[in-house]
Image (tube, grey):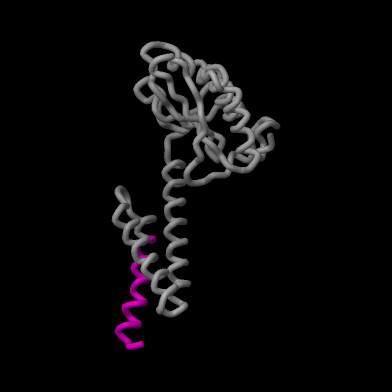
Amino acid sequence: MGVWQTVSLVFMPVLAGWSALRILARQGQRLLDYFSALLWSGAAIGLGLGDGPGWLLAAGCVTLAATLLAHLLVVAARRMNQPLREVDPAAFRARLLEVCTTDPSPPAFLAGVGPDGTITVWGLEEAGIPRDRHRPGATCGSCLLEDVVTELAVNGEDVVASYRTMLSRRANQLFVLRRGVISGDWEAELRPVQGLKAPYAHAPCQVHRYGRP
């Protein structure tokens, strides 16, 4: 293998690693960095699996793992940088139910408990509930959301049971609630959390502590 060919092969993981670093460092759009990191990592892995040297395969796997790790860190940092609001649990629960049972109610929303125990709600911004981290004092955030889902959704009890099962497997979930166009009834389902998947490990209740059902 010639010198220039070796140099060109070395540049593949170098460019992939540089793009992974830019994913962490860049503010705003990162699509080009993601594309570059995945492209060069994939090229290195492809050549390493083919006629290329073995070290190229290893380097490509390392840069691919670094890209995935950078993505997880960006997602985690974005979530942790959301404003933190201290809320009264009873008032927050009542507000969620009021928004969803008063016409015109939103067609859908998502809610979940983060790894820090705070509640985040998406889709109710126009109703005055911001997409912030809400800390419900000493109340368990999972218990609060379970109460809302059970009272609001026609299939709430079944979804809550599935939610507890997934938490017991250390797989945090989001509640997705949609209102039927014709019936007007709310229905719930679960969606896996993207990013840090472990549920809150120090819930103030025995039901959700360390994910045990």
Q: Main secondary structure of the magenta part?
A: helix
When the figure is inspected, residue 85 is found, relative to residue 181, above or below; the finding is below
* Residue positioned 69% across, 37% down in the render: 212
Picture mark count:
0
Image quadrant for the N terminus?
Answer: bottom left
Tell which residue pokes out farthest to the bottom in this image: 2
Q: Is residue 29 left or right of residue 76?
A: left
Residue 54 in magenta stretch: no
Image quadrant for the C terminus?
Answer: top right
Q: Choose top left, top right, bottom left or bottom right for residue 9.
A: bottom left
On the image, the x and y values in percent for residue 130 come to 40, 27
- Which stretch did the figure color magenta? 1-20
Q: Is residue 89 visible?
A: no
When the figure is inspected, residue 91 is found, relative to residue 204, above or below; the finding is above
Q: Choose top left, top right, bottom left or bottom right for residue 11.
A: bottom left
Q: Is residue 61 visible?
A: yes
